[in-house]
Amino acid sequence: MGDSFTATAPILGDRGDGCVRPPTSWPAQLADQIGLGGTDRFVDVSCNGGTIDTGEGFTLVQQARKAAAAGAFGPATRAVTIQAGWNDTWGSSPGRAFPSVDCLLDVIRGCGLDAADQGRLPDYRAVSGEAYADRVRTVVDYVRYYAPNAKIVLVGYPEVFVGDQATACIQVGAAIAVQPNAAGYIAYLTALDAAQRDAARILGVDFFDALAATKGHGSCTGDPWIGGITGVDSLYVGAPIHPTPLGNSVVASALRDRLAF
């Protein structure tokens, strides 16, 4: 279950339910690595735009229902992964990290710490382990009941921008766009990562550190595993400011080792 960082949704194509799940996503690559790709023993209900509980799209509850309908939960279920939160609203701000990613390209206002108060970003101050745990608890409890032997894993997000700084950059074709005032956006990503870690501890489930697995390979680094805005393949196998197939491969391999598959 998850959002476009799970599905790594390209702009073109879908699977008939409005969701895009290419074979280059980390769940698909993980399934292939353990020999379950293309079988009914692997169920992927992640969707671009997926949320924990924000909006009327593919929330975790809705994804869990789809997975249950596909027979995904039972005594034989070995693992259930959840990667969500990026697209949710937090606090009183109506802003979301996507599609308000355009604030990173706003040369006038930028994407600073005041963006949350302006309703252009989620309120990073409201993102905590307790709040995250409260929002995912219903689905975690559901999975625990119907798949009692499954390892439940909250999957963190990869490195998109280098943390602990106020600037962010995005590859735009052959050029690089630098946002010198991105402190708010980066603070939100940092808070979300910490919240997922703490929520896993609170709920007694596993946490997979995708940030550590992809460290040093964020946007505009020497070897980026995050795609730019106009990558030649982003229409088909990825999405702007989302993991590349290589980045997903690294996450899949590291998660496979963590799960001991």
Image (spheres, rainbow, N blue to C red):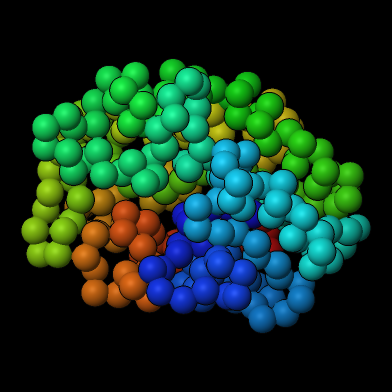
Say whether residue 246 is visible. Answer: no
Name the image quarter holding residue 9.
bottom left
The x and y percentages for residue 5 are: 47, 55
Query: In the rendered view, does 9 fall on the left or right side of 170?
Result: right
Q: Residue at x 33, y 31 (%)?
A: 120
Rendered view: 70 above or below 186: below
Query: In the rendered view, does 225 fall on the left or right side of 147?
Result: left
Name the quadrant of the C terminus.
bottom right
Q: Residue at x 59, y 51 (%)?
A: 57
Residue pushed farthest left?
175
73 or 112, which is in the foreground?
Answer: 112
Q: Residue at x 38, y 68 (%)?
A: 11
107 or 187, which is in the foreground?
Answer: 107
Query: In the rendered view, does 149 fall on the left or right side of 60?
Result: right
The x and y percentages for residue 45 are: 65, 62
175 or 116, which is in the foreground?
Answer: 116
The x and y percentages for residue 162 are: 27, 39
Rendered view: 163 above or below 172: above
The x and y percentages for residue 39 are: 72, 79
Residue pushed farthest front?
56
Say whether residue 107 is visible. Answer: yes
Name the image quarter holding residue 183.
top left
Name the quadrant of the N terminus.
bottom right
Q: Residue at x 82, y 64 (%)?
A: 69
Name the image quarter holding residue 198.
top right
Q: Could you tell me how many numbered marks the image carries?
A: 0
